[in-house]
Image: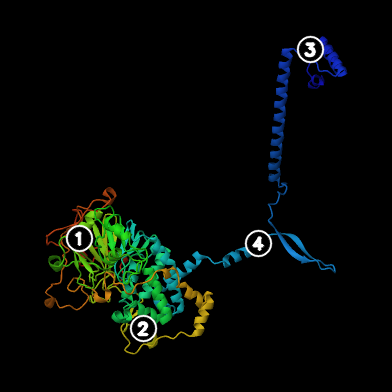
Amino acid sequence: MNMFQNTGIGLGSNNWNRRRTRDSRDSSSSGTIVAITDKQTKSLLRERDAKIAALEKDVIGLQNKISTLSKEQAMITGGQRKGKKGLTPYGNTVRVSVSKCSAKRRQLLAERNRMGRNASLSTQAILNSLPDENSSKEVLINRIQDMFRSPNEHVGYLKSEQFAKDLLKLNKKVKGILEDEPRCVFLQSPAYVFGDIHGNLEDLHFFSDNVWNLGMALTAGNFVFLGDYVDRGMSCLEVVAYLLAMKLMLPQKVFLLRGNHETRDVNGWEEHYGTRSFIYQCRERFGDELGYKVWEMTNSTFDRMPLAAVIDQDIFCVHGGIPRPVSDSSVEGGRIKDILNVNKVAGINPPYEHEDDEYQQVASDCIWSDPASDHQESSTVNRHTGYGDSLRGGGAICFGHKAVTDFLQQQGFSYIMRAHEAHAEGVAVSKGARVFTVFSTSKDHNQGNNAMAGCILIDFEKMQVINRSPAYRNQYVHRRDSVSLAMLSESEIAERIKLGLIEGHTGEEEEEEEFEEEEWEEFDDELNTSREEMDNSSVDEDEEYVIDDRRKSSVEPNMTTASPPGSTHDNHDFDVEASGMPAKKIDFSGVDSAVRRKKRDKGKFTTITEEDDDSEESTVNGDEMMEPFDDSENYEPGASTTMSPAMKKFSL
């Protein structure tokens, strides 16, 4: 076999060599293979073959190493060859062409062109031209925020059709968010709770400057507004626009509850509220037709607002008060379940045809009821149910100590936070320090020049009251005789008075602004919208909901008074002697929170007990006496640096 010769194997024996040669010759001549039977020889051959394979592997490894070293040397000496270019993108296009011959036949031509930067820029330009819902939402929110920061610089915008269209767009976007929320929302602290605002942009701006001065998005915690955003104040549209924009931007952080003024019967009561009614301001700003669309679209959004909220499964928040039970209170869920069963879209005052009578009563109680006064507790409140007729009249109810105790025990809550009643101190307590009333506007309720606007911060096991001092002055609402108005004409001053940016009256008749048709058409062209599109924006799924004008509500607003006479929240002139009901004075002394449990350990607060101690000293958990809050480093002229007089005796 030639294999033995090539490998150079020798056994050192001539006889073996001769035998090998002869066998090879015989094998080649006969065409047969001679098998070697010697086991020792086969083993030796296998060892040699293995060595050869190992040597070949070493040779290949050395060749690769030499190649690598050669490349490294070339890089060092600068002799490296140019590397291969990266892949170049090409685009294939097919187009129809006409032949150059006399027949002029049409033919398809395929072209392959390199795609460069120009193609990328063109593609990006086309993508940017496509409508982006998120981008349009951001533009809308930014426009409203700019208006809120400096309304004096946006007087023209506030009187324009663009502002009306922005309101229609806001309502259309937000109503879907509100309808998806339950009628009672559940959230965690920290949370800021605000009461009635009533179109008071000045006090809302105070909270913006001092509570979320970095913006709501960057402020820790949630924001709960207890309703009554419109009527009484001169900036109802601005307040609604700002709060809806915040809800659109932060749907899981901002919660807007419904108040009694978020109903058509109340905010459409122009005969009672006059120029301060919401419907009047809509019509005065945008004309009868467009103003009515804005008013109706906004009320459609109000119809979808939640009625209540629960913070940390312990604090019940509502505009008016606790509703009467319509189902067995012993059943799991109790009154909260009743609220959750209220229709997702509820007119309340007046109701829709589809609203159930029992749950329409639940909704009315949530937005209309009040705590009973001492006189009512002893005279009109039912001792078995804890409810009675409210001094407001019109079918509204009040709730007493028993109703509060039963509700808190059945639901496992500790406190009730509500709005609905004006208080000069901004925050007040009642019913054994278990019911907190928050009022976040200091104007338009005859509380005097020293009235304060307040809110409450709930931060786990602590509560903190934040009040606006009467001495606080903002930067854009001025008095009629302010020096800063010296450069404005009488017409400009009149416009700012209409918008609530100047306090006082000119003494002259205020002329309504007439919009030129050319300006309206320019605005339509700018937004690429037609009047038909604007009309369609106010026509939506609400057509299936029909208001029943013949049907009576649980509460008749035109039969009620603005607030119960003779109570601490009285905002009307009231003859105490004639009524025989002395005004109630709430005593804040002796309120102690030492028995409150940590929420993280127990999941709820315990009840704050009220003591008869007349001492004004109050402690927190048995520690040293509470000192007035001092923020001298961040002091702003006119801003309050201490707790309100009412809260100085309050330890939370």
Residue 475 location, quadrant = bottom left
Query: Label 1 to label 2, Cα distance in Å?
Result: 53 Å
Say if mark 4 contacts mark 2, CB within 8 Å.
no
Q: CA distance from mark 1 to mark 4?
A: 73 Å
Distance between mark 3 and mark 1 Cα atoms: 120 Å
Q: Nearer the viewer, mark 1 or mark 4?
A: 1
Q: CA distance from mark 2 to mark 3?
A: 126 Å
Q: CA distance from mark 4 to mark 3?
A: 78 Å
Camera-near label (4 vs 3) is: 4
* Residue 299 placement (x, y as % from top left): 37, 72
Residue at mark 4 to residue at mark 2: CA–CA distance: 56 Å
Residue that carries the numbered disc 1 in the rendered image: 403
Q: Residue beneath label 4, please?
A: 117
Q: Mark 2 touching mark 3, by CB under 8 A?
A: no
Q: Which mark is residue 485?
A: 2
Q: Residue 89 in the image: x percent, y percent?
A: 68, 56
Q: Residue at x 63, y 62 (%)?
A: 120
Asked whether 650 or 128 is in front, the reply is 128
Label 4 Cα crowd, 10 Å radius (few <14 / some 14-19 / many 20+): few
Badge 4 amino acid: Arg
Of the two numbered discs 1 and 4 on the same chain, state the one appearing first in sequence: 4
Q: Nearer the viewer, residue 39 or 162?
A: 162
Task: Locate residue 98: give its quadrant.
Answer: bottom right
- At a point 40% along the width and 80% down the height, the residue shown is 285
